[in-house]
Amino acid sequence: MAEQCIFCKIRDGQVKSNILHRDDTCFVIRDIAPKAPVHLLVIPNEHFTVLTSLTPGHAKMLGGMFIAAQQMAVREGVDKAGYRLVINQGDHAGQQVPHLHLHVLGGRQLTAMG
Ligand code: AMP
């Protein structure tokens, strides 16, 4: 665990959060500052910072994150209307928390990205 990482603290119960889903690859919480009616964060259990460090050994982790994202989209009722999955990587993408996470955004018409 990275000592100062908010997502590691949530994973370990040191910071309270409602964990909606947890499995051996990842866990899911609601974003504290939602940008859409449904705004979830799918977070790998492993503290993982930069996508450039990905190896084939991370395939299970990434697969688990995408499976959890689509299951949560169904649970939240946004799967039929559509939703967006976003990963912000680095400064130019506006990444705030340096622990890989997948945003799941839905529940309204989303505007084009830019
Ligand atoms: P990113 O900009 O991709 O790094 O996204 C980080 C996200 O984490 C932001 O949308 C924040 O609102 C969210 N966030 C930060 N702290 C918490 C927290 N304690 N609980 C839930 N979401 C958080």
Image (cartoon, helix red, strand yellow):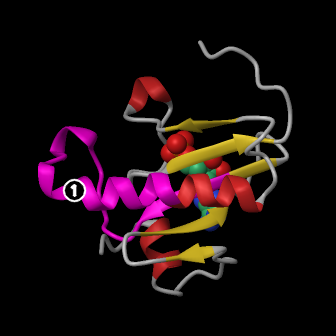
Identify which residue, 44 or 67, lies in the foreground: 67
Q: Is residue 84 magenta?
A: no
What stretch of residues is rendered in magenta?
Answer: 40-67
- Give the tally of numbered discs: 1
Please report the residue visible at 22 percent of the width from the left and 56 percent of the height from the top: 58
Identity of the amino acid at label 1?
A: His
> Relative to residue 111, is residue 72 drawn left or right?
left
Q: Is residue 64 magenta?
A: yes
For the C terminus, the quadrant is: top right
> Relative to residue 92, is residue 79 drawn left or right?
right
In terms of image quadrants, where is residue 92? Answer: top left
For the N terminus, the quadrant is: bottom left
Q: Is mark 1 within 8 Å of ligand 1?
A: no
> Relative to residue 17, is residue 96 drawn left or right?
left
Which residue extends farthest front? 80
Please report the residue visible at 46 percent of the width from the left and 85 percent of the height from the top: 12
Above or below: residue 32 compared with residue 110: below
Q: Which residue is mark 1?
A: 58
Q: Position of residue 28 (x, y in %)?
A: 58, 66
Identify which residue, 92 or 82, lies in the foreground: 82
Which residue extends farthest bottom? 13
Label 1: few (<14), some or many (≥20) within 10 Å? some
Above or below: residue 99 compared with residue 37: below
Q: Position of residue 99 (x, y in %)?
A: 39, 55
Q: Position of residue 55 (x, y in %)?
A: 13, 48
Please report the residue visible at 80 percent of the width from the left and 41 percent of the height from the top: 36
Please report the residue visible at 70 percent of the width from the left and 41 percent of the height from the top: 105
Find numbered disc 1 in the image and state the secondary structure of the residue it sits on. helix
Q: Position of residue 27 (x, y in %)?
A: 51, 70
